[in-house]
Amino acid sequence: NAGVTQTPKFQVLKTGQSMTLQCAQDMNHNSMYWYRQDPGMGLRLIYYSASEGTTDKGEVPNGYNVSRLNKREFSLRLESAAPSQTSVYFCASSYKQGWPSYEQYFGPGTRLTVT
Amino acid sequence: SQELEQSPQSLIVQEGKNLTINCTSSKTLYGLYWYKQKYGEGLIFLMMLQKGGEEKSHEKITAKLDEKKQQSSLHITASQPSHAGIYLCGADSGNTPLVFGKGTRLSVIA
């Protein structure tokens, strides 16, 4: 099993450009998540999908959109990139969202720089 | 919303020494998760604690959740260079996704 995979691993964008970060999991998990990690800020939730067909905003959703393409795939789109979106982006998945809870499994991350 | 405070923010210990990292919540915890992140990599799940007073161990790492379920500690015995990295605690409030602390950066020197 590959677990959670993310593409690309690195990306440099110019301000105003758009791009989509891809995430896939092969663990048959129901819930998927997108986080960003910034120095001194820890991990912050951008969007999540509790189950196929649903998406919800997290703590920092502005400037992002998501698509739960199917049970395996959850993509994050930046429509018009801004320097403030320079960060490391992590995708995660878990068996399900809610109580009783299950641990989240994380992908290796995408390092995004917006110039 | 739930907030998690981790202390210390960073820690430098000599190889072979013991250390403790704390995670304190502003609300009662339903579940407390510990993750380790190696520099430049993703997060690796270590342990999950759900019951007040619960304690779990994995190799030389022990995590405890206090009786009131508002504080957890992570203790490493006889630290090794392989323990170096960032340790993050994550909290489950019942219906919302995990909220994470800002992390503790651990360096182990020879």
Image (tube, rainbow, N blue to C red):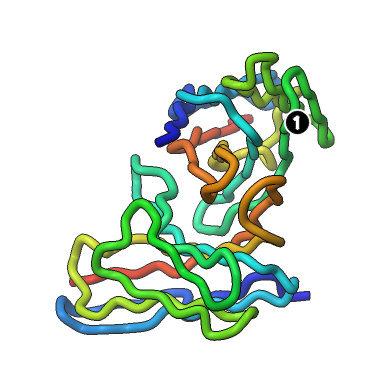
| Residue A8 image position (x, y, % from top left) | 46, 80
**Which chain does the numbered disc 1 sit on?**
B
Question: If the image is split into quadrants, where does the N terminus of chain B sit?
Answer: top left
B23 sits left or right of A79 in the view:
right
Q: Of residues A32 and B104, which is closer to you in this image?
A: A32
> Is residue A100 in view?
yes
Residue at the image position 44 percent from the left and 49 percent from the top: A43
Residue B12 image point, x, y percent = 52, 26
Above or below: residue B31 compared with residue A31: above
- Residue B34 coordinates in the image, percent (x, y): 64, 38
Q: Residue at position x 38%, y 82% from top? A: A20
Element carrying mark 1: strand
The C terminus of chain B: image quadrant:
top right
Mark 1, residue position: B61
Quarter holding residue B79: top right
| Apparent side of residue B107 relative to residue B51 in the rendered image (left or right) | left
The residue furthest top is: B67
Question: Label 1: few (<14), some or many (≥20) within 10 Å?
Answer: some
User: Amino acid type of disc 1?
Assistant: Ile
Q: Position of residue A33 (x, y in %)?
A: 52, 63
Residue B60 or residue A85, whichever sits in front: A85
